[in-house]
Amino acid sequence: NAGVMQNPRHLVRRRGQEARLRCSPMKGHSHVYWYRQLPEEGLKFMVYLQKENIIDESGMPKERFSAEFPKEGPSILRIQQVVRGDSAAYFCASSPLAGDQPQHFGDGTRLSIL
Amino acid sequence: AQSVTQPDIHITVSEGASLELRCNYSYGATPYLFWYVQSPGQGLQLLLKYFSGDTLVQGIKGFEAEFKRSQSSFNLRKPSVHWSDAAEYFCAVGVPNAGKSTFGDGTTLTVKP
C-alpha cells in the first residue's frame, strides 16, 4: 500500500487539541476517500473529495470535523477540539477516476487521545 | 442504502485446514464486492473483487470467493490455510460509480499450528 501515503502513522493528542491527518494519493489519482475504523469495527466512510471539491460528506460528523483536498498538496482531515471518542484509525484511499473502485488504501493514521 | 454483514466475529482453524468466511450484503442491484485483509497495525490489502461476469473469483494468496445472487452472499474460501493468513478480513460492497465502499465489521482469523 506504499502508493497512498499517510502521515503521521501515529498521532497522540490531548483532549481539546487539534489533529491534522494528511494523505497523499497515488500518483495520477485525483479522488480521495477518508474512512474511520473504531476498535473492533470495520471501516466507516467519512468523506469523498476531488481536487478542491467535496463530493460526498455524508459520513462526516456534523461538528469539529472537516476535510479538504487543495489543488496542490495532500488531502487534510482536520479534527478540532478532540475528545476521547475520536481515538481510532483513520484511513485514506484514492482512485484515478470518479467513483472508481476499488480504491487503493494507505496504511492509516492511528490517533490516540489522552 | 447498502449494508454488509459478516456473521462470524472470530474463527479459529488449524494450519492446513480449509477456510470459509461468510459475507452477506444488502443492495437492490448487483453491487461491486470486495474482500480485504488487514494485518495488525497495517492498512487494507485487496484480496479479490467482483464486478460482473464469472461468479467464482480468484484472488491473491490462494483465496477465492463466490458471488451467489440468490443468497446475497460473497463468501471467501481457501482450501488450505497457512499460519501467515492469520489477520482480520473485511468484506465490502460498493455501489457502481458511487465511489465509497461499505464495510462489514470484519472476521478475525486465528490459525492454530
Image (cartoon, rainbow, N blue to C red):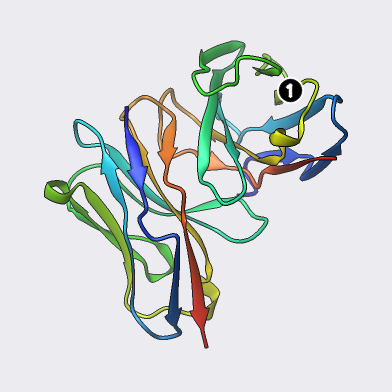
Quarter-wise, where is residue A72 in the image? top right
Who's the residue at 53% across and 17% down the image?
A57
User: Relative to A90, does residue B107 appear above or below in the rendering?
Assistant: below
Is A47 on the left or on the right of A75, as rendered?
left
Kind of residue sitting beneath label 1: Arg
Please state the horizontal and vertical placement of residue A31, each as a whole percent of the image: 53, 25
Numbered marks: total: 1
Front-most of A12 and B59? A12
Who's the residue at 18% across and 53% down the image?
B55
User: Relative to B78, does residue B94 appear above or below in the rendering?
Assistant: above
Q: Chain of mark 1?
A: A
Quarter-wise, where is residue A36 in the image? top right
Q: Secondary structure at mark 1?
A: strand
Who's the residue at 55% across and 27% down the image?
A46
Considering every residue shown, the one lying at the far top of the view is A53
Who's the residue at 51% across and 45% down the image?
A42
Q: Which residue is mark 1?
A: A78
Considering every residue shown, the one lying at the far left of the view is B70
Is A95 on the left or on the right of A63, as rendered?
left
Please state the horizontal and vertical placement of residue A61, each as a whole percent of the image: 60, 20
Front-most of A114 and B66? A114
Is A83 on the left or on the right of A44, as rendered?
right
Front-most of B32 and A84? A84
User: Relative to B38, does residue A31 appear above or below in the rendering?
Assistant: above
User: Relative to A6, does residue B66 appear above or below in the rendering?
Assistant: below
The quadrant of the picture occupied by the N terminus of chain B is: top left
Q: Residues within 10 Å of mark 1 (few under 14, many from 20)?
A: some
Front-most of A38 and B58? A38
